[in-house]
Protein backbone atom coordinates (compact mmCIF):
# COMPACT_ATOMS: atom_id res chain seq x y z
CA UNK A 1 0.00 0.00 0.00
CA UNK A 2 2.84 2.41 0.82
CA UNK A 3 4.43 1.80 -2.57
CA UNK A 4 1.13 2.64 -4.19
CA UNK A 5 0.85 5.85 -2.16
CA UNK A 6 4.39 6.79 -3.18
CA UNK A 7 3.60 6.33 -6.85
CA UNK A 8 0.39 8.31 -6.57
CA UNK A 9 2.14 11.11 -4.68
CA UNK A 10 4.83 11.42 -7.33
CA UNK A 11 2.09 11.60 -9.95
CA UNK A 12 0.10 14.35 -8.23
CA UNK A 13 3.01 15.99 -6.46
CA UNK A 14 2.79 19.69 -5.93
CA UNK A 15 -0.88 20.00 -6.92
CA UNK A 16 -1.77 17.44 -4.27
CA UNK A 17 -0.04 19.56 -1.63
CA UNK A 18 -1.80 22.67 -2.88
CA UNK A 19 -5.13 20.85 -2.63
CA UNK A 20 -4.27 19.71 0.92
CA UNK A 21 -3.53 23.24 2.08
CA UNK A 22 -6.55 24.62 0.26
CA UNK A 23 -8.87 22.14 2.00
CA UNK A 24 -7.56 23.34 5.34
CA UNK A 25 -8.43 26.93 4.45
CA UNK A 26 -11.80 28.05 5.89
CA UNK A 27 -12.49 30.07 2.73
CA UNK A 28 -12.74 26.97 0.56
CA UNK A 29 -16.33 26.08 -0.39
CA UNK A 30 -17.72 22.98 1.30
CA UNK A 31 -18.64 21.30 -1.95
CA UNK A 32 -15.04 21.48 -3.19
CA UNK A 33 -13.85 19.99 0.10
CA UNK A 34 -16.37 17.22 -0.37
CA UNK A 35 -15.13 16.61 -3.92
CA UNK A 36 -11.54 16.39 -2.68
CA UNK A 37 -12.53 13.97 0.09
CA UNK A 38 -14.48 11.78 -2.34
CA UNK A 39 -11.52 11.75 -4.72
CA UNK A 40 -9.18 10.66 -1.90
CA UNK A 41 -11.61 8.00 -0.68
CA UNK A 42 -11.95 6.51 -4.16
CA UNK A 43 -8.21 6.43 -4.78
CA UNK A 44 -7.37 4.91 -1.37
CA UNK A 45 -10.33 2.55 -1.27
CA UNK A 46 -9.79 -1.10 -2.12
CA UNK A 47 -13.13 -1.02 -3.98
CA UNK A 48 -12.57 0.32 -7.49
CA UNK A 49 -14.13 0.10 -10.91
CA UNK A 50 -11.03 -1.80 -11.97
CA UNK A 51 -9.49 -3.81 -9.06
CA UNK A 52 -5.95 -2.84 -8.10
CA UNK A 53 -4.74 -6.43 -8.16
CA UNK A 54 -5.10 -6.18 -11.94
CA UNK A 55 -1.91 -4.14 -11.89
CA UNK A 56 -1.64 -2.16 -15.13
CA UNK A 57 -5.27 -1.14 -15.45
CA UNK A 58 -6.04 -1.11 -11.73
CA UNK A 59 -3.52 1.63 -11.08
CA UNK A 60 -4.20 3.40 -14.35
CA UNK A 61 -7.76 4.31 -13.37
CA UNK A 62 -6.56 5.80 -10.05
CA UNK A 63 -3.79 7.80 -11.70
CA UNK A 64 -6.13 9.01 -14.44
CA UNK A 65 -8.70 10.12 -11.90
CA UNK A 66 -6.02 12.03 -9.97
CA UNK A 67 -4.63 13.56 -13.16
CA UNK A 68 -8.04 14.98 -14.09
CA UNK A 69 -9.65 15.40 -10.67
CA UNK A 70 -7.03 17.46 -8.85
CA UNK A 71 -6.59 20.10 -11.57
CA UNK A 72 -10.38 20.33 -11.97
CA UNK A 73 -10.84 21.03 -8.27
CA UNK A 74 -7.98 23.56 -8.30
CA UNK A 75 -9.56 25.41 -11.24
CA UNK A 76 -12.90 25.68 -9.45
CA UNK A 77 -11.62 27.07 -6.16
CA UNK A 78 -11.59 30.80 -5.34
CA UNK A 79 -8.44 32.71 -6.30
CA UNK A 80 -7.57 33.84 -2.78
CA UNK A 81 -7.73 30.26 -1.45
CA UNK A 82 -5.55 29.01 -4.30
CA UNK A 83 -2.98 31.78 -3.76
CA UNK A 84 -2.81 31.07 -0.02
CA UNK A 85 -2.36 27.35 -0.61
CA UNK A 86 0.33 27.90 -3.24
CA UNK A 87 2.28 30.21 -0.94
CA UNK A 88 2.03 27.62 1.88
CA UNK A 89 3.43 24.95 -0.44
CA UNK A 90 6.26 27.27 -1.52
CA UNK A 91 7.16 27.87 2.14
CA UNK A 92 7.16 24.13 2.78
CA UNK A 93 9.40 23.48 -0.23
CA UNK A 94 11.84 26.16 0.88
CA UNK A 95 12.01 24.66 4.37
CA UNK A 96 12.56 21.16 2.96
CA UNK A 97 15.36 22.34 0.68
CA UNK A 98 17.21 23.61 3.73
CA UNK A 99 17.73 20.07 5.04
Image (cartoon, rainbow, N blue to C red):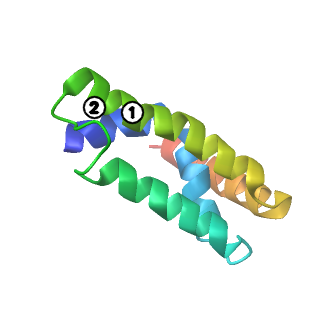
SS type, badge 1? helix
Real-space Cα separation, disc 1 to disc 2, in angstroms: 6 Å
Q: Residue at x 65, y 41 (%)?
A: 71
User: In the rendered image, which quarter is residue 87 located in?
Assistant: bottom right
Nearer to the camera, 90 or 66 = 66
Residue 93 picture location, percent across and down:
57, 45
Q: Vertical placement of 90 versus 26: above or below?
A: above
Please indicate whether residue 40 sits to the left or right of residue 69 in the image. left
Furthest residue toward front: 49
| Tag 1 and tag 2, C-beta contact below 8 Å | yes
Furthest residue toward left: 53
Q: Vertical placement of 99 versus 53: above or below?
A: below
SS type, badge 2? helix
Furthest residue toward right: 79
Nearer to the camera, 23 or 38 = 38
Q: Residue at x 49, y 40 (%)?
A: 66
The residue that label 2 is drawn on is 58
Residue 90 picture location, percent across and down:
65, 48
Furthest residue toward bottom: 26
Residue 25 visible = no
User: In the rendered image, which quarter is residue 28 located in?
Assistant: bottom right
Residue 44 picture location, percent across and down:
31, 52
**Marker disc for residue 61:** 1
Q: Residue at x 65, y 74 (%)?
A: 30
The quarter of the picture where the C terminus appears is top left
User: In the rendered image, which quarter is residue 59 located in?
Assistant: top left
Q: Vertical placement of 72 versus 21: above or below?
A: above
Q: Residue at x 54, y 59 (%)?
A: 36
The quarter of the picture where the N terminus appears is top left
Amino acid sequence: MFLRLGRLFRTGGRDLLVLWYACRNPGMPWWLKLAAILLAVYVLSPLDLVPDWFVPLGWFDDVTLLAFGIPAILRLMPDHVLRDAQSAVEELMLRLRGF
